[in-house]
Amino acid sequence: MQTVSENRAFGGVQGVYRHAAQTTGCEMTFGLYLPPQAKRQPVPLLWYLSGLTCTHENAMTKAHAQEHAARHGLAVVFPDTSPRGDGVADDPAYDLGQGAGFYVNATQAPWAAHFQMWEYIATELPRVLMANFPLKEDRQAITGHSMGGHGALTLAMRLPGRFASVSAFAPIANPSASDWGRKQFAAYLGADESAWAGHDATLLMREAGFAGPVLIDQGGADQFLDLLRPEALAEAMAARRQPGVFRMQAGYDHSYFFVASFMADHIAFHAQALGQ
Amino acid sequence: MQTVSENRAFGGVQGVYRHAAQTTGCEMTFGLYLPPQAKRQPVPLLWYLSGLTCTHENAMTKAHAQEHAARHGLAVVFPDTSPRGDGVADDPAYDLGQGAGFYVNATQAPWAAHFQMWEYIATELPRVLMANFPLKEDRQAITGHSMGGHGALTLAMRLPGRFASVSAFAPIANPSASDWGRKQFAAYLGADESAWAGHDATLLMREAGFAGPVLIDQGGADQFLDLLRPEALAEAMAARRQPGVFRMQAGYDHSYFFVASFMADHIAFHAQALGQ
C-alpha cells in the first residue's frame, strides 16, 4: 500500500492511499480520514460510498464529513466507485463502466475481469484498512450518495452484523425498476433478473430489512427523482416496520450541497449507533 | 446579471452568478451563499478571497463555510481571482495572469486593460451585490486564503470603515519581499517599488494597522512558508500592538483541508465583530 498524500484536517489526517487490488485486478485508490482520537486508540469506521462519475476524491473534498467525524471520533473511508485504468473495460456513457461500478460483481464480458466492486468493498478493502490503520473492525457503519446510497443499503442488508447502522443520501432506491439500474444490471449481471434482486435496496428491504437503525435523506427538488424512485423504498420501509427515518427535504437537489447540508445529522446518527 | 446555478444548502442558497464587469472589461463569475436568515431580512456579508489558480468555485465547495455561515446568519461571497477569457492577457505560469490577479489595478501592458481586480472587488462587485441581494452594506467583513489573504488584509487596511473585521488563512504576508509578489507587482505595477507598498500587508500593518480585530491562521507545515513570510506580518502586528490573534497551527499545510479545519473559528470571529 502506497501513500499518495496526507493532509492534516480538523486535528486528524485526511489521507489518500493506493494499493494493488486482487479482486478488481488493478490499482485502487481510496481516501481515509482518521480523526484525532485515532492517535491514541483504534476508532470506529464509517464507510462513504460515492455516486456515478465520482472517484474517491469528490466526497473527501465536498461532503464536509471530516469536521463532524472529528467531533465524534469516527474514521471515514472514501473508496473509488469502480476499477480504473487503460486495461479496464469502459463505456462512453457516464453511467456504465469506469466511475459506475454499481457495487456488484460482474459476471458478463467484458466487465467480469475487473468489475468486482462488491467483493472489493465487502472483503478486500476492509482487510487492507484493518491491517494498516487503527480501526475497530467490530464497529462499522455505512452511508453513501446516489449510486453509493444503493451500495450502502445493499451491503448493509446483505452483510448482517457487519454494520451497526446504515444511511443514504438520495439513494438509487429501486434500480431493477429504473434506467439507473436495468441497463447496468443487464450489462454486468446478464439478462436473468433473478440475479439483480440482491442488488435492489427496495426488494431487500421487503425481503429482509436491516437489524439496526436506518436514515434516508432525499431532496424534494432532486432532478433525478424519477430514476431514484424513493417512494418505493419509503413504502418498503414502512410496510416492513423497519426502524428508521425517511426524510423528504424540501427544495434540495442531487448535488453535494445537499449531501453537505445533512452530513452533520448522518454522522451523529452513526456515532450514536456505534456508541461514540 | 445572470444566474448560473442555485443550490439549496444548509437551509439557504448557494448561488453562482455572472455579470459583464466594467472594471475588468469581461464577464465575471462569483459565488454567493445566502443563509436562511436572508429570506426574512438583509444579512451581513463576509468576503472570501481565493488564492492562486482558484476560480469562484474552489472555496465554495472546499472551504466548508456554508454550514457556519448559516448558523451565524452571514452571507459569503466568493469572487473570482482575475479577469478571464480569450481576449484577456495571460501567462503560462500559474502565478501570473488569469487566476493570479493579486487584487491590484494593473498599470502596465499587457495587463492594464483587464487586470483591475482591486477596483472590481472594492467598488464594482459590492455595487452589484448590494443592488441584487438582501445584504447589509454597513455590515461587512473580509477573509481569504494565500493570495486571497493578501487581498483581504490589504483591502481591509486601505478601506477604513468598510470591514468590521479581517482574517486570513496563510496569507501572502509580505509580497514585496517574496517571489510571490515581486514578479507579479513588477509585471502589473511596474518597476517602481513605491507603487507596491499599498499592496503589502506587512508594510500596511506597520504604517496604518486595522481599526478592528484581526485573526491570522498559518499552517506550521505549509509547503510555501518561505514565500508567505508570516514572520514579517506577525512581527508587524505585535510591533504595532494591533488587536488581534496570530495562530501558528502545527502540522497543517497550505491545502483547503487546512482552511476548512479553521473555518468555523473564522466565521464565528467575524460574526461576533458584525454583532451576529
Image (cartoon, coloured by chain):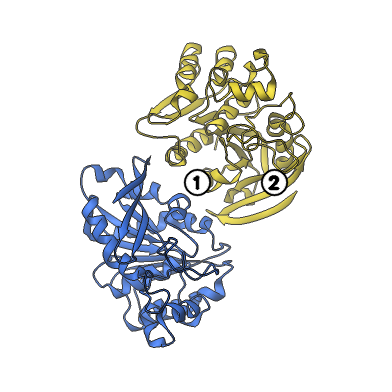
Chain colours: A blue, B yellow
Residue at x-position 23% and y-position 56%: A130
CA neighbours of label 2 inside 10 A, class few (<14), some (14 to 19), many (20+) = some
Between residues B131 and B88, which one lies in front from this camera angle? B88
Figure quadrant of the C terminus of chain B: top right
Give the secondary structure at mark 1: helix
Query: Do badges 2 and 1 share one subunit?
Result: yes
Q: Chain of mark 1?
A: B
Residue at x-position 69% and y-position 30%: B122
Tell me where residue A206 appears, x and y as whole percent: 37, 83
Residue B182 left/right relative to B267: right
Q: Which mark is residue B133?
A: 2
Instruction: Name, please, the residue furthest toward the front.
Output: A87
Q: Which mark is residue B62?
A: 1
Visible in this render: residue B90?
yes
Tell me where residue A244 appears, x and y as whole percent: 37, 70
Of tags 2 and 1, which is closer to the observer? 1
Q: Earlier in the sequence, mark 2 or mark 1?
A: 1
Tell me where residue A262 appears, x and y as whole percent: 46, 57
CA neighbours of label 1 inside 10 A, class few (<14), some (14 to 19), many (20+) = some
Residue at x-position 48% and y-position 30%: B170
Q: Chain of mark 2?
A: B
Q: Is residue A220 above or below residue B28?
A: below
Tell me where residue A71 appears, x and y as whole percent: 34, 47
Residue type at mark 2?
A: Phe
Q: Is residue B234 above or below residue B145?
A: above
Q: Which mark is residue B121?
A: none
Give the secondary structure at mark 2: loop
Residue B110 left/right relative to A236: right
**Image quadrant where residue B252 sits:** top left
Residue type at mark 1?
A: Lys
Q: Is residue A174 above or below residue A74?
A: below
Distance of mark 2 from mark 1, alpha carbons? Answer: 23 Å
